[in-house]
Image: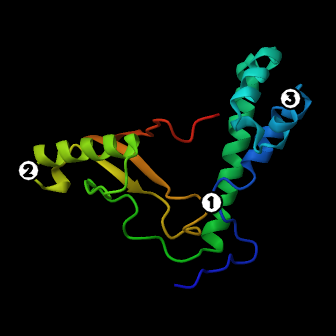
């Protein structure tokens, strides 16, 4: 399958620009960092950078600063979302927001995060007597398939979700030795 090129003016990720913005907003370049830390981008993802930031930045303990950062990041994500809708890669997938517990595990997949996710899905599917629509929990729920490049944000899926009522859900992002600051 041929790789589609990014349409002109279209973002390739919902998070385009957010890393650079967060680094600049937090003024991380001013910290006394090692050359190795300075080379890692984005800076905010480095464990040492985060530790140094927390030691030296009492001003950011103010809720107003946190609110301003989150508001600005959300504005960038919304801008990217609108851009993605205007210059789509394709139509949104019919599988977006599907409620169908995924229980299959590739033989080579030994990720504790995926194994836990699939075990929860298997247990809830058994409780629902194999009927996905009746399952209280679901996993690996696509949210943005078709809007952006399939390689831009990886798989933008909700790891685990619990349905409380018809339109009331809890969403969970699992982290187990992956994607965590170094």
Looking at the image, do the residues carrying marks 1 and 2 touch, with CB atoms under 8 Å apart? no
Task: Name the N-terminal-most of marks 1 and 2.
Answer: 1
Q: Nearer the viewer, residue 100 or 92?
A: 100
Q: Quadrant of the C terminus?
A: top right
Above or below: residue 45 compared with residue 104: above
Q: Nearer the viewer, residue 102 or 181?
A: 181
Q: Secondary structure at mark 3?
A: loop
Can you see residue 158? Answer: yes
Above or below: residue 144 compared with residue 56: below
At horizontal 45% and vertical 35% (from top left) the residue drawn is: 176
Query: Residue 56 location in percent, x, y?
Result: 83, 16
Q: Estimate how packed mark 3 is, as few (under 14), some (14 to 19) or many (20 or more) residues with alpha carbons within 10 Å.
A: some
Q: Which residue is mark 1?
A: 81
Q: Which residue is mark 2?
A: 129
Query: Residue 109 location in percent, x, y?
Result: 37, 53
Q: Secondary structure at mark 2?
A: loop
Q: CA distance from mark 1 to mark 2?
A: 38 Å
Query: Exactly how many numbered labels are in the figure?
Result: 3
Q: Quadrant of residue 59?
A: top right
Q: Nearer the viewer, residue 114 or 68?
A: 114
Residue 84 vs residue 144: left or right? right
Q: Secondary structure at mark 1?
A: helix
Q: Which residue is mark 3?
A: 33
At horizontal 36% and vertical 43% (from top left) the residue drawn is: 160
Q: CA distance from mark 1 to mark 3?
A: 34 Å
Can you see residue 165? Answer: no
Looking at the image, do the residues carrying marks 3 and 2 touch, with CB atoms under 8 Å apart? no
Task: Name the N-terminal-most of marks 1 and 3.
Answer: 3
């Amino acid at each position: 399958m041929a790789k589609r090129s990014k349409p002109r003016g279209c973002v390739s990720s919902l998070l385009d620009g957010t890393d650079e913005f967060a680094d600049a907003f937090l003024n991380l370049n001013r910290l006394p960092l090692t050359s190795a830390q300075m080379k890692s981008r984005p800076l905010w993802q480095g464990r040492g950078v985060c530790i140094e930031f927390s030691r030296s930045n009492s001003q950011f303990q103010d809720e107003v600063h946190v609110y301003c950062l989150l508001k600005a990041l959300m504005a960038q994500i919304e801008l990217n979302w609108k851009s993605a809708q205007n210059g789509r890669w394709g139509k949104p997938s019919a599988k977006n927001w599907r409620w169908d517990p995924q229980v299959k595990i590739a033989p080579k997949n030994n990720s504790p995060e995926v194994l836990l996710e699939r075990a929860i899905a298997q247990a809830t599917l058994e409780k629902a007597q194999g009927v996905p629509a009746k399952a209280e929990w679901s996993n690996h729920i696509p949210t943005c398939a078709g809007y952006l490049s399939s390689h831009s944000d990886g798989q933008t899926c909700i790891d685990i979700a619990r349905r409380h009522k018809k339109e009331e859900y809890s969403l969970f992002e699992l982290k187990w030795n992956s994607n965590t600051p170094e």
